[in-house]
Image (cartoon, grey):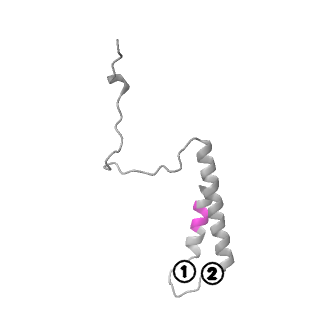
Amino acid sequence: MAMRKTLAKIIRDLTPSDSALRYPLSDETVEDVKKCFDLISARERELAQAAGIDVRDRPHFVDEPRTTNVVPIQGLKTKD
């Protein structure tokens, strides 16, 4: 995560504020940076899978309607 954030900050700092200015990095360097981001993403997926985390999980808003209904175990009765 630190590598991703640092690389993103470097790119943000190098990006000219005026669109008329030339970008300071060569096209080859830009492609290399994209490959670095791809490698970082792949490693993050590997670590998440090793930890048993579903990488498809996405954040949800608090007021978002739930698609599941959780039933507490304490409310269940056993069959006699």
Q: Residue at x 35, y 23 (%)?
A: 74
Give the main secondary structure, helix, strand or loop, of the magenta stretch.
Answer: helix
x and y percentages locating residue 53 in the rendered image: 54, 44
Which residue position holds label 1?
Answer: 16
Vertical position of residue 40 compared to residue 52: above or below: below
Classify 10 Å Cα crowding around label 1: few (below 14), some (14-19), many (20 and above). few
Q: Residue at x 53, y 49 (%)?
A: 55
Residues drawn in magenta: 5-9
Q: Circles 1 and 2: CB distance less than 8 Å?
A: yes
Asked whether residue 7 is drawn in magenta, I would say: yes
Label 1 – label 2 distance at C-alpha: 8 Å
Vertical position of residue 31 compared to residue 78: above or below: below
Which residue position holds label 2?
Answer: 24
x and y percentages locating residue 23 in the rendered image: 59, 82
Between discs 1 and 2, the one toward the N terminus: 1
For the residue pair 22 and 50, the one nearer the viewer reads as 50
Q: Amino acid at mark 2?
A: Pro
Classify 10 Å Cα crowding around label 2: few (below 14), some (14-19), many (20 and above). few
Residue 52 marker: none
x and y percentages locating residue 22 in the rendered image: 59, 86
> Dot 2: what SS?
loop
- Residue 52 falls left or right of residue 77: right
Q: Residue at x 34, y 11 (%)?
A: 80
x and y percentages locating residue 48 in the rendered image: 58, 47
Q: In which quadrant of the rendered view does residue 9 lie?
A: bottom right
